[in-house]
Amino acid sequence: MRIIWGILCCLSLVIAFGPVRKLRLPLWCRWILGFFAFSAAQGYVLQKLFDASVMCPDKLPFFLLVPAKWGDIAILLTGLFSLAWILLRLCRIKCPAWVPLCSGMVLGGVMLWLGVRQPPVQERLLEVANLPAEAEGVRIAVIADLHIDCWREKRWCETFVARLNALQPDIVVFTGDQVDGEIECRREDLSPLAAIQAPGGKFLISGNHEFMFDAEGYLGLYEALGLTVLDGRIATSRGITFVGLPDERSLVVSHNVPILDRLVKELPPEAFSVLLVHKPGIAPEADARGIDVQFSGHTHGGQFPGLAKIMERFNHGFVRGFYTLPEGMQLFVAPGSAAWIGFPYRLFYTSELTLFTLKRAPHAE
């Protein structure tokens, strides 16, 4: 984080001595704008002053958290745009000085808003060749990377649950990273999850972020809220057998193959299986073991171009949307319903509350 802070400070100086210096404003105005640019790069210093965690800055007051998160992305974008503006001037291409300044600040605000807003609903059709008759028409809500935290608190969670219930899903599944922060800070914020209505069941697995705090405590809290934790377990509902894999603290690909092997052996004969696993990289192993469908998250859909390529590299090429594997398994990598507060920015690859309707494929006999 210190390296990132250093980069942002350098970019703020580029802004101050680049386009800000060339604005047709009084000198005192340009000095104020330059100081504002440098101040906007001090989100890391603010967190240190309040002894706030990088993972979830609960101790940082909300009125400072918002400008700190906006300042990080705004200075990064404005600084890069300012470097481009300087290159254009060196090439004798005229561009008004206000263009990189306004572009970076506005785009930064848009990216932050897209990262923290309520996710739009996306209804999808999932056609499966061997779908049991009992599962025909079943509606499954897939919730990935909810990241309830010091920004998305109880009120945000209440609104999310109300929107989820309005969809009237038969089954709700969570694919990990439901929360950030210490458990005592999140008990009340997570309480609205108890109001989720799903007659076919509410199933949940852990993500790596649970293990960055108190995984055992959080899994117990989820159970107390009426969510069935499937870490290392299976459960059957509406003709669908859900297979749950736990996660761990690692940010890279998880390989819980021994646990998967054990669970596959426990599957009923001819079961229609749906694997719930936070990181999508285990999909080739799941496909080879006869799993029918896999729901994952973790990548947040890439969040925006560029970052998506990095996510792809660390997740066996799986970033967002549908993938069909060699043995016929269908993988869906959810774009996430939110994003980690440490880097809550999105552009193009937006969040989503996904509702699947299951249907037997037309060519199936």
Image (cartoon, helix red, strand yellow):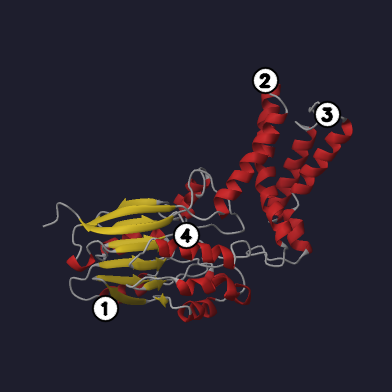
At a point 73% along the width and 28% down the height, the residue shown is 97
Farthest right residue?
Answer: 28
Residue at label 4?
A: 298
Spatial CA distance of label 3 from label 4 is 46 Å
First in residue order: circle 2 vs circle 3: 3
Mark 2 to mark 3: distance in Å? 25 Å
Asked whether residue 213 appears in the rendered view, the answer is no
- Cβ–Cβ below 8 Å for labels 1 and 2? no
Instruction: Give the mark nearest the N terminus, 3 or 4.
Output: 3
Residue picked out by circle 2 = 91
Dot 2: element: loop
Tell me which label, 1 or 3, sits earlier in the chain. Answer: 3
- Whole-percent x and y of residue 41? 74, 48
Cα distance between the residues tagged 2 and 4: 42 Å
Identify the residue at horizontal 73%, vertical 57% (top origin).
64
Q: Earlier in the sequence, mark 1 or mark 4?
A: 1
Question: Along the polypeptide, which appears first: circle 1 or circle 2?
Answer: 2
